[in-house]
């Protein structure tokens, strides 16, 4: 699976005011993937909490981002700035100029891509499925799951593509992918009292181009509730154990 644009996109852009197609998104992904091995070397078997890992990842990205790139990274992007209790997405990618992506214009200083980050292998049992769906500490449903928030339009409601980062601190890539897809299969059969429906498209598909044993990439395609739109998620997983 790809993002439906040519693979020979430039790694850096010049100075025009608009960029066509999905090149900005692919450039963001290329930039991050090139730095993930450095992140692994620095933080493997060290920080075991999501906020600390994400803060250090954003700092690593920002400190290596030259002025030639037409975007920057921001942590904890509030999804509705008019509400003090609005949900926030872990990492937003903000434009420095106007982008035109899939017939939509993203203005200067507007986020055009984002990542939600989750730990795979948390100690708390009630958070075990949080990459997918969320529960509070009484095991009652709570909309804090990663994929769940994209499906429910809590995160990135104006975007057709976004990302998930998985910090693996226990087990391995294949085990977690199989677990998450099994949980999705269970939700397809029995979604419970939630308003969401699940399908085979929600499952994570494999990427056969894995070049680094500590980095994996997957894709999933999700139907949002209420507005019949879809969002493609690019999953970047990092082996930190």
Image (cartoon, rainbow, N blue to C red):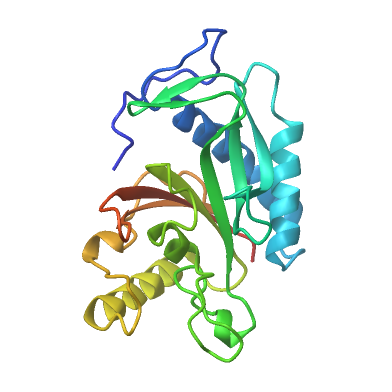
Residue drawn 63% across the image and 47% down it = 81
- Report the number of discs: 0
Rendering quarter of residue 181 = bottom left
Q: Position of residue 165 (x, y in %)?
A: 54, 54
Residue drawn 24% across the image and 75% down it = 188
Q: Please indicate whether residue 205 sits to the left or right of residue 125 in the image.
A: left
Q: Please indicate whether residue 110 sits to the left or right of residue 129 in the image.
A: right
Q: Is residue 64 visible?
A: yes
Q: Is residue 167 visible?
A: no
| Figure check: 132 above or below 7 | below
Q: Name the foreground residue: 236 vs 86.
A: 86
Rendering quarter of residue 202 = bottom left
Q: Quadrant of the N terminus?
A: top left
Q: Residue furthest bottom?
A: 138
| Figure check: 194 above or below 73 | below
Q: Position of residue 90 (x, y in %)?
A: 62, 53
């Amino acid at each position: 699976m790809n993002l439906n644009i040519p693979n020979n996109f430039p790694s850096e852009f010049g100075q025009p005011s608009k960029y066509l197609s999905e090149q900005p998104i692919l450039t963001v992904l290329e930039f991050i993937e090139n730095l993930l091995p450095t992140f692994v070397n620095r933080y493997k078997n060290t920080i075991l909490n999501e906020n600390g890992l994400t803060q250090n990842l954003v700092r690593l990205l920002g400190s290596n981002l030259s002025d030639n790139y037409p975007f920057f990274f921001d942590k904890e992007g509030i999804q509705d700035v008019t509400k003090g209790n609005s949900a926030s997405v872990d990492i937003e990618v903000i434009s420095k100029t106007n982008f035109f992506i899939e017939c939509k214009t993203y203005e200067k200083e507007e986020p055009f891509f984002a990542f939600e980050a989750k730990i795979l292998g948390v100690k708390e049992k009630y958070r075990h499925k949080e990459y997918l769906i969320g529960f509070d500490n009484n095991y009652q449903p709570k909309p804090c799951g990663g994929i769940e928030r994209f499906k429910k339009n809590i995160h990135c409601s104006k975007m057709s593509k976004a990302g998930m980062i998985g910090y693996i601190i226990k087990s391995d890539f294949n085990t977690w992918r199989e677990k998450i897809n099994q949980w999705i299969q269970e939700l397809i059969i029995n979604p419970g009292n939630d308003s969401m429906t699940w399908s085979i498209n929600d499952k994570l598909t494999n990427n056969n181009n894995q070049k680094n044993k500590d980095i994996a990439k997957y894709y999933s395609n999700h139907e949002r509730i209420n507005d019949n739109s879809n969002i493609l998620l690019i999953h970047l997983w990092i082996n930190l154990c």
